Amino acid sequence: MIYQISSSITLVVKIFLPSFWLAFFNAFTLIVLFTDKSSIGVLPTGGLRLGAVLFLASGVFIFYKMIYPLKRIDLDANYIYVSTYLKNVRYAKSDVVKLETNKNILFTFGSVILNGEGSFGKRLNFIASVSKFTRAMNALPDWKEKVQQTQ
């Protein structure tokens, strides 16, 4: 049986949040950039345009560095399955060095560390579901030796 250890919120955070944010702020930035000076009102146009472009660029940078690397992770007795929702890869249990979990304020983040470079890199990051992770570890005791939890 295959157990999902990543949170279902990964789909929302990885796909829907960036899509809606980028659609809204791309439209806003285009409107600010291509509106003539008299239509903006009392705000200085140069500062508003620069601010809109910088805000859009900083959001894209944050999504690229923090959200884009998140994966969906599933386990069974012999394999770990990694998905970006577009591409799926299976690794043998022997390829996994350790499973790390780290509890933060909002989420519990996890990482799968591989022996060598895989299709998505050596470190695979995900948002962990504590209940699903615990259920998987109870059902698959062979994986417990690879788990390392930090605060």
Image: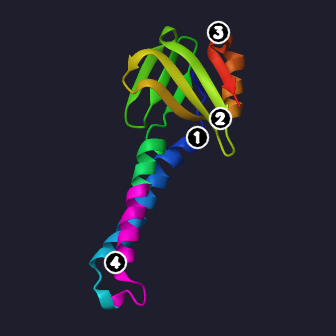
Q: Nearer the viewer, residue 92 or 100?
A: 100
Colouring scheme applied when the structure was drawn: rainbow
Mark 4 or mark 3: whose residue is earlier in sequence: 4
Marker disc for residue 8: 1
Camera-near label (4 vs 3) is 4
List the residue tagged with mark 2: 129
Judge by depth and name the residue closer to the eye, 101 or 2.
101
Element under disc 4: helix
* Whole-number angstrom distance, CA of label 1 to CA of label 3: 24 Å
Q: Are marks 1 and 2 in contact (CB under 8 Å)?
A: yes
Task: Give amino acid for label 2.
Answer: Ser
- Residue 43, image x, y percentages: 42, 85
The answer for how far apart the CA atoms under marks 4 and 3 are is: 60 Å
Contact between marks 1 and 3 (CB within 8 A): the answer is: no
* Residue at image point 71% right, 25% down: 134
Q: Which residue is mark 3?
A: 142
In the image, residue 43 lies in the stretch drawn in magenta: yes
Q: Is residue 49 left or right of residue 77?
A: left
Q: Look at the image and give the residue range highlighted in magenta.
A: 39-58
Q: Position of residue 29 (x, y in %)?
A: 35, 70
Q: CA distance from mark 1 to mark 4?
A: 42 Å
- Secondary element at tag 2: loop
The residues bearing labels 1 and 2 have C-alpha atoms spaced at a distance of 8 Å
SS category of the residue bearing label 3:
helix
Residue indicated by mark 4: 46
